[in-house]
Amino acid sequence: MKLILLGAPGAGKGTQAEIISETLRIPTISTGNIIREALKSGTELGRKAKGYMDSGQLVPDDIVIGIIRDRLAQPDCADGFILDGFPRTIPQAEALDRMGVAIDRVIEIEVADDTIARRVSGRRICPGCGSSYHVDYKRPTVEGICDRCGDTLVQRQDDRPDTVRERLSVYHEQTEPLKSYYAAAGKLFVVEGQEEIADTSRLVLAALEQ
Ligand code: ADP
Ligand code: ZN
């Protein structure tokens, strides 16, 4: 199963990706996590990406396409994968097609903008392993501490309210056109994002079985 998760920032792609990944035993590839990782370890990629990311802009296509090309060549991607946060522009989708990657399904998680703004403000991430949490919807066992690795949770720089507004407008302008792109290919399944994570998961897993 080669799957793309589409949706606005904070729609719950990463959370659903984790659940599908465990259910289907295929890796999740999150360009956001890969870039944050590079930022943290101070690589050249991280240096190039930082300004864009902090201001809520997209990192240039050629950089992100390079990341994905390298990642999909790894052996653990052979039996399938979930793309979370890629493609985010039409040229990225075209590049994926040109790589000869045959996507089976694209699932779009739809959430209204005002709900997004509320959710993102409560999001916390683990700088150690990239896991994400929410102060109301997905609380760690011990407050402020990652269940998986024990690191202290933080709020992402780009989850501050004004940056979130910018990211939403970037989403509507540059990423939303992908819905028509994949609908035209007969691959798009739309899932209405629910209040509860488990309810959205049920809808997502049902869309995978259609
Ligand atoms: P979210 O989970 O809120 O959708 P991500 O963690 O996926 O956010 O991405 C955070 C930031 O990383 C984006 O705002 C952008 O700057 C950069 N980024 C991630 N994926 C891509 C991509 N495919 N193309 C360009 N920039 C990207
Ligand atoms: Zn962790």
Image (cartoon, rainbow, N blue to C red):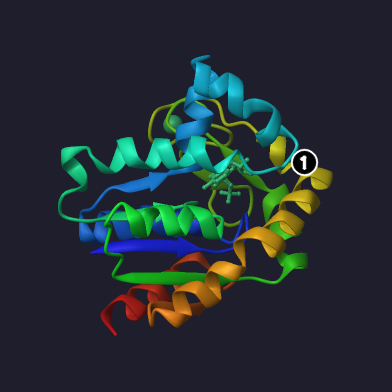
In the image shown, does 1 or 64 lie closer to the viewer?
64
Q: Quadrant of the N terminus?
A: bottom left
Q: What residue do we see at 29% from left, 85% from top?
A: 210
Residue 20 as seen in the image, left or right of residue 152 = left
Res 144 visible: yes
Residues 156 and 183: in front is: 183
Q: Looking at the rendering, which quadrant does residue 59 occupy?
A: top right
For label 1, the residue is: 160
Q: Position of residue 63 (x, y in %)?
A: 50, 35
Residue 40 place in picture, x, y as percent: 53, 19
Left or right: where 87 falls relative to 112: left
Q: Residue at x 49, y 16 (%)?
A: 43
Left or right: residue 22 versus residue 31 is: left
Mark 1 residue type:
Arg
The residue drawn where x is 68% and y is 48% is 122
**83 lies left or right of 145:** left
Most distant residue in the right direction: 162
Q: Residue at 62% x, 67% y: name it.
A: 176
Q: Which element is circle 1 on?
A: loop
Picture layout, residue 136 above or below residue 33: below
Quick check: which quadrant has ligand 2?
Answer: top left
Q: Residue 130, percent across and down?
A: 46, 35
